[in-house]
Image (cartoon, rainbow, N blue to C red):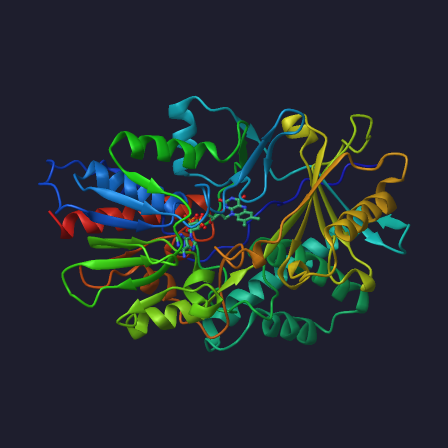
Amino acid sequence: MPTAAPRRRGWRAGTARAAAAAPLLLLLAPLIAAPRPAAAAGEVDAIVIGAGVAGLKAALDLATGGNSVTVLEARPRTGGRIHTLNDPRWGAVELGAQWIHGQPNVLTDLCKERGWKRLPSDLVGGVGYEATSQTTAKEITDAQWTAWEKLFSDLEERIEVLQEESSDGKNLAWGVKKFIREEDLTDSQIKGVDFMVNQEWVQEYAASTKRLSLNWFDNDAEDLGGDSIIERGYSAVPDDLLSQARAKGVKVLLNQTVAEVDYSEGDSVVVTTTDGQAYTASFAVVTLPLGVLQAKKRDGGVAFSPRLPSTKRRAIKNLKMGVLNKVILGFPDSAKWTQYNWVDRIPLPTDAGRWREFFSLRNITGKPLIVAFNAGDAALYGDDPSDETLVADAVSALRAMFGADNIPDPDYSLVTRWHQDPYTFGSYSVVAAGAKGTERKDLAAPVGKLLYFAGEAADVDYPSTVQGAWLSGAAAAKAAVLDHP
Ligand SMILES: Cc1cc2nc3c(=O)[nH]c(=O)nc-3n(C[C@H](O)[C@H](O)[C@H](O)COP(=O)(O)OP(=O)(O)OC[C@H]3O[C@@H](n4cnc5c(N)ncnc54)[C@H](O)[C@@H]3O)c2cc1C
């Protein structure tokens, strides 16, 4: 098979508009303060809700700033949307976040400090296929790639112009349709645009173009490339934060699902869990995922008393959770599909938009693992299909492209359903049509000196990423330490 031309490829490598990098050094400056007098018995200075990267980073910095801190986490584990299964045969299997991507990145610095090996996983080494039946597929030719990439680059330019001209209510699908109509594209060109749009935007932002805001979907800092994978697994990051935080006296309580946050007293916050346990603090840092902030109380949401201010409620409403799910397949060593890191596929109409993108770890970690990514509407499986059906369908799609001889039955498989996870209700946040572009800033804004907000959705420059979660946790802790000297 000819090697496809190197091309832009990878998770969240979408176009970018506002490229102002966060003042990293400022955010990372250690928050050192003299120890404060101990809080009243049974109480702490700070409660942090959620023990993902945002919560653990906030807890660590608050403790470094002299605060007594309790972290309340609903799951029986820390790390949230970072979840590595370390397996002797398959190595680090990532159910959630996989890549450190783009530079600068605080996680690259952390890996260097700790001596953790990063495996380069740059965006080249891909191939594309168009499914022609359940058992056959034809390779996308170099001429098609070239033509489609040119079309997509024209589309990107047009979208930028439309972003300047259009009202906030428009979605990205509207802009794509307008481009197709005005350029009078042929069916084959439309197929190319659809392929590129899916690969570059739907897979990256984990949402259909109908859901994404035309004006603000790509309003984050530019990804400068240089993606890598932490060899020992992404969970090394939250694990490291946890052990540092514990060393500073932070208490991390697992299996504590927060149901209510009462800040009506004006000088303290009472956080109550679903089993009726109440914790009191001078202030709280809320790192609940956007999906949990959006959920109704009866569906696993959290009640704030009094209600959150209207700007914050609007921010929570205008952002949406994107969905990216993985079907992870482990093959016998004899499996021959090793040449490509990435495979993009034009699915059959009967595929429900699934099996558009596959990623092989073999060239990167040496393990014969292939990850199928389903994004947006294609990832909202519900209860049907079953895990077995999803695995069988992914294997069939691979066999149609690479031949049954090269794709034996997998020895190992895992299916994620992040959209049904009651502690996130999705994978990461996106900016939906109707948004004003200020939502992430509004979500991050503190409520008085009582509630501070962090989490990937609340980071302006690197939303939807681990780096964004880290920076938002650092920023919330910094604001709280300044407010509570
Ligand atoms: C499939 C997938 C792939 C991804 N790939 C990448 C990638 O390659 N690179 C990248 O940078 N990012 C990636 N991300 C995004 C990244 O994982 C997140 O942006 C980041 O981990 C979010 O951290 P957080 O602390 O904001 O939220 P979380 O990690 O979700 O932490 C929030 C915590 O709050 C807890 N919680 C929820 N409800 C309650 C409650 N009621 N009471 C108490 N605790 C509660 C949760 O259990 C969780 O532990 C991916 C995400 C997914 C799902």
Is 34 on the left or on the right of 473, as rendered?
left
Q: How far across and down, in percent of the image, does residue 349 sit?
A: 81, 64
Q: Residue at x 46, y 49 (%)?
A: 222
Q: Is residue 167 above or below residue 65?
A: below
In-image side of 375 versus 427 (left or right) = right
As drawn, is 152 to the left or to the right of 448?
right
Image vertical order of residue 318 relative to residue 132, above or below: below
Label total for image:
0
Vertical arrangement, residue 477 with respect to residue 367, above or below: below
The spot of residue 258 in percent (x, y) is 37, 57
Q: Residue at x 72, y 30 (%)?
A: 368
- On the question of residue 450 being in view, the answer is no
Of the 4 image quadrants, the one containing the N terminus is top right
181 w.r.t. 301: above or below: below
User: Where on the picture, by quarter, is residue 338?
Assistant: top right
- Asked whether 273 or 302 is in front, the reply is 273
In this rendered view, identify the residue nearer to me: 70 or 132: 70
Does residue 423 appear in the picture of this structure?
yes
Residue 236 position in % (x across, y down): 46, 31
Instruction: Name which residue lies at 46% across and 63% down.
Output: 300
Residue, x 14% and y 53% (percent of image)?
483
In front of the other: 55 or 470: 55
Residue 288 in which image quadrant:
bottom left
Q: Residue furthest top?
A: 115
